[in-house]
């Protein structure tokens, strides 16, 4: 999630963009908080995110690399979608397109039914403070700020008062088991603790969509289990998540698994209960889904 909204950073080196605070009176989703009421968009059947015909080619010394090739993707409110595939398949590029960190060469992205085609860099920055939270593999915490300041900064940038930002930070750190680390510096934390801080930072503004790019990619098995548990926990309380991972353990926490290879979606399997257009869960298990589960085992 995001520390600041400076010009869009390289994924592994700069603080990630932030997402915006809910009004003080609105109930926030998350463990220990009231579940959010279904949005009007859910009842109307409008997906939270829709991408159509996305294409992105990177140009370098070795020639063009076709990272994303004509991808169509729909994510509904309350879904937990895992995008899996080998390194170099284009998964992270797809996630960066969905979060406005990169621009597609062609294709369209809509958020809550609104086209992003005319969005400027500044407008995308606003969206990452209001509707989209992002977590990166290498945390992207601001090294010279305390844990408390890293988490509070996105809320302050989005217009929260210092008192509101502090209250949200205290809730999240408590939920994530970090309430004793508020005054620590990032370098004093383990990798798992740093990723939990990054998760708190991404969620401090109650984004409708959480994008997670290999959030356990630099963690050991214990840290991976913790990230998986936390993502599943927030999802259970209504958080919509799109996760990019090559780790089958993380993907198994999702209720929908997309296989991504050579810039294309090669399979899209729903596991267990999936959200209907009215926000209620309905069971759907396909033969494809069963095959994905067997592969994960």
Image (cartoon, grey):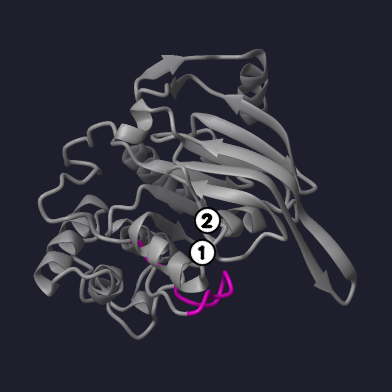
- Residue 8, how many percent across, how many down? 53, 74
Task: Please report the residue visible at 62 percent of the width from the left and 50 percent of the height from the top.
Answer: 108
> Residues in magenta?
7-19
Extreme residue toward the front, this view: 118
The circle on residue 19 is: none
Extreme residue toward the bottom, this view: 144
The circle on residue 116 is: 2
Disc tally is: 2
Residue 248: say if magenta. no
Assign the magenta stretch its main secondary structure: loop
Q: Give the answer, above or below, for where 112 lies relative to 37.
A: below
Q: Give the answer, above or below, for where 214 lies relative to 271.
A: below
In which quadrant of the rendered view does residue 146 lie? bottom left
Task: Please report the residue visible at 22 percent of the width from the left and 50 percent of the height from the top.
Answer: 175
Extreme residue toward the right, this view: 63
- Residue 255, how many percent across, how many down? 49, 29
- Residue 93, how many percent across, how many down? 66, 58
The residue that label 1 is drawn on is 119
On the question of residue 2 being in view, the answer is yes
Residue 8: say if magenta. yes
Quadrant into which the N terminus falls: bottom left
Callout 2 secondary element: loop
């Amino acid at each position: 999630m995001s520390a600041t909204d400076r010009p869009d950073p390289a994924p592994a080196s700069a603080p990630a963009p932030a997402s915006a605070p809910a009004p003080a009176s609105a109930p926030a989703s998350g463990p220990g908080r009231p579940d959010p009421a279904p949005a009007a968009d859910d009842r109307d059947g409008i997906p939270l995110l829709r991408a159509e015909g996305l294409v992105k080619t990177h140009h370098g010394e070795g020639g063009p690399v076709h990272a994303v090739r004509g991808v169509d993707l729909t994510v509904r409110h309350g879904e937990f979608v895992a995008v899996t595939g080998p390194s170099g398949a284009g998964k992270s590029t797809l996630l960066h397109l969905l979060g406005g960190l990169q621009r597609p060469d062609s294709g369209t992205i809509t958020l809550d039914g609104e086209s992003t085609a005319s969005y400027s860099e500044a407008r995308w920055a606003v969206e990452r403070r209001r509707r989209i939270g992002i977590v990166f593999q290498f945390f992207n915490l601001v090294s010279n700020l305390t844990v408390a300041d890293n988490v509070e900064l996105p809320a302050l940038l989005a217009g929260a008062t210092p008192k509101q930002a502090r209250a949200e930070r205290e809730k999240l750190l408590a939920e994530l088991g970090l309430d004793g680390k508020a005054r620590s510096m990032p370098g004093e934390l383990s990798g798992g603790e740093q990723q939990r801080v990054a998760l708190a930072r991404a969620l401090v503004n109650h984004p409708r969509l959480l994008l997670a790019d290999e959030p356990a990619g630099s963690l050991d098995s214990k840290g991976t289990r913790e990230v998986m548990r936390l993502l599943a926990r927030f999802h259970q309380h209504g958080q919509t998540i799109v996760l990019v991972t090559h780790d089958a353990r993380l993907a198994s926490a999702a209720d929908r698994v997309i296989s991504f290879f050579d810039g294309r979606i090669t399979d899209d399997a729903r596991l267990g209960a999936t959200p209907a257009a009215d926000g209620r869960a309905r069971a759907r298990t396909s033969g494809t889904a069963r095959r994905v589960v067997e592969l994960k085992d």
